[in-house]
Image (cartoon, rainbow, N blue to C red):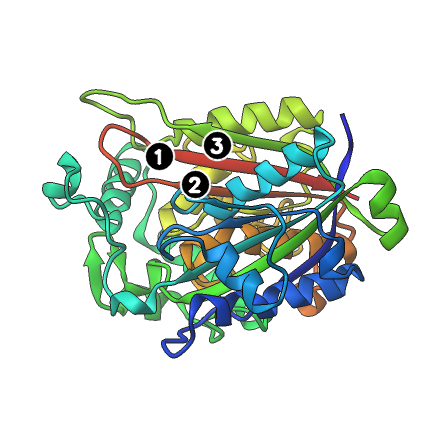
């Protein structure tokens, strides 16, 4: 089985680009990743494009505009895990020897929906009852607050931390700091979440270039290696679901740690799926960064801030960087790779050697989440 490395990364700043097409959004990130790797597009063996709501064949639309048609292109839809699932497919292809190099694209344009919550499938029973994503996460938060004493102020602190990180990230959609008071005083969306505790919607793209070991070393002296790549699907559960622990992430984290031989105490930074403030706190526990029920205190201690024990979402996370859903997984990997190379300036995690990226996709009845993709990278 061939070792796999990331040799090039690129992304466009996340934001609102109503005038741009999917191809317009995607090709600059691809060009940036190819230039970063120092590889010509004609030397890429295969491409994998992750997108949830971009319509048919976004990969062909993007690469066709660049004159890179003709190579094998696979389009992947897996909700918010779309581009991280595309990444796993690329990794498996290189590991199996089916290709030596691969391109991964994540792209999404949410401004075409005109705002509001993500459109879910109306045939789904829970969606018919009003189970949009803010409502789902709000129930998780209320239950966790009831069971473990988490406070509204601690929830707000997640936004404060991630928005402070986003100020230092030129690719982030939200680049102004906020205070706890501003977070708590912003308009209510779904109790206990105010507006500033919900990730913004927008548009964006990110791209990655992968290669097997021999090819990677030809192009870079500092490749970032894939230590683990896990994709788990949710387990259907009738009736009661424990909303205070993300079962699919707990299971996926166990798989990723086993595959990599790396444990939670060895993770130098993590990019996790903080679509809402409570989500980040639940993932502290799911990844074993702190014991069950102690996420609020762990955050408040500074452990997950840059300079802390395990910085979480130094990019600003979804709360600040934004969440164009099909692009999110690839963009998380862009941040991890740049951190491991030491290229992140004022938000750099000093001495980072191991990083984790985590994206989940949900919104269907009976599942904690429908998909969860976890990757661990090392220098």
Q: Nearer the viewer, residue 335 or 281?
A: 335
Earlier along the polypeptide chain: callout 1 or callout 2?
2
Tell me where residue 196 sits by quadrant: bottom left
Q: Which residue is mark 1?
A: 369
Horizontal and vertical percent position of residue 6 = 73, 48
Disc 1 to disc 2: CB gap under 8 Å: yes
* Left or right: where 226 falls relative to 120: right
Q: Which residue is mark 3?
A: 286
Residue shown at the point (43%, 50%) measured from the top left: 274
* Left or right: where 134 falls relative to 290: left
Horizontal and vertical percent position of residue 293 = 41, 32
Q: Which residue is mark 2?
A: 360
Residue shown at the point (11%, 42%) measured from the top left: 128
Tell me where residue 193 sits by quadrant: bottom left
Spatial CA span between label 1 and label 2 = 7 Å
Q: Nearer the viewer, residue 108 or 190?
A: 108
Q: Nearer the viewer, residue 193 or 335?
A: 335
Split into 4 quadrants, where in the image is the N terminus?
Answer: top right
Earlier along the polypeptide chain: callout 3 or callout 2?
3
Residue 105 visible in the snapshot: yes
* Left or right: where 90 falls relative to 129: right
Q: Nearer the viewer, residue 70 or 56?
A: 70
Mark 1 falls on what kind of element? loop
């Amino acid at each position: 089985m061939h070792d796999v490395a990331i040799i090039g990364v690129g992304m466009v700043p996340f934001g609102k680009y109503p005038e741009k097409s999917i191809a317009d959004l995607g090709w600059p990130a691809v060009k940036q990743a190819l230039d970063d790797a120092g590889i010509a597009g004609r030397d890429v063996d295969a491409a994998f494009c992750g997108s949830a709501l971009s319509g048919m064949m976004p990969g062909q639309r993007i690469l066709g505009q660049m004159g890179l048609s003709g190579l094998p292109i696979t389009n992947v839809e897996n909700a918010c895990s779309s581009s991280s699932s595309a990444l796993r497919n690329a990794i498996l292809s290189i590991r199996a020897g089916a290709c030596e190099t691969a391109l991964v694209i994540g792209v999404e344009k949410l401004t075409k929906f005109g705002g509001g919550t993500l459109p879910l499938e109306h045939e789904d029973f829970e969606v018919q009852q009003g189970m949009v994503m803010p409502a789902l996460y709000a129930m998780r938060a209320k239950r966790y607050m009831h069971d473990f004493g988490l406070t509204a102020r601690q929830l707000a602190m997640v936004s404060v931390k991630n928005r402070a990180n986003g100020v230092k990230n030129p690719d982030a959609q939200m680049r102004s700091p906020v205070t706890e008071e501003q977070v708590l005083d912003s308009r209510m969306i779904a109790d206990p979440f105010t507006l500033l505790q919900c990730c913004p919607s927008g548009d964006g793209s990110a791209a990655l270039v992968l290669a097997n070991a021999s090819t990677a070393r030809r192009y870079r002296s500092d490749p970032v290696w894939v230590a683990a790549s896990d994709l788990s699907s949710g387990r259907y559960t009738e009736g009661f679901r424990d909303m205070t622990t993300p079962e699919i992430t707990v299971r996926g984290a166990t798989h990723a740690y086993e595959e990599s031989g790396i444990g939670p105490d060895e993770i130098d930074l993590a990019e996790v799926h903080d679509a809402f403030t409570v989500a980040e706190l639940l993932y502290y526990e799911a990844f074993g960064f702190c014991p069950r029920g102690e996420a609020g205190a762990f955050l408040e201690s500074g452990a997950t801030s840059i300079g802390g024990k395990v910085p979480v979402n130094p990019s600003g996370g979804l709360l600040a960087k934004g969440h164009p859903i099909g692009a999110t997984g690839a963009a998380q990997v862009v941040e991890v790779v740049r951190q491991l190379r030491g290229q992140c300036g004022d938000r750099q995690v000093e001495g980072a050697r191991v990083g984790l990226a985590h994206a989940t996709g949900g919104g269907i009845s009976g599942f904690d989440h429908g998909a969860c993709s976890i990757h661990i990278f090392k220098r």
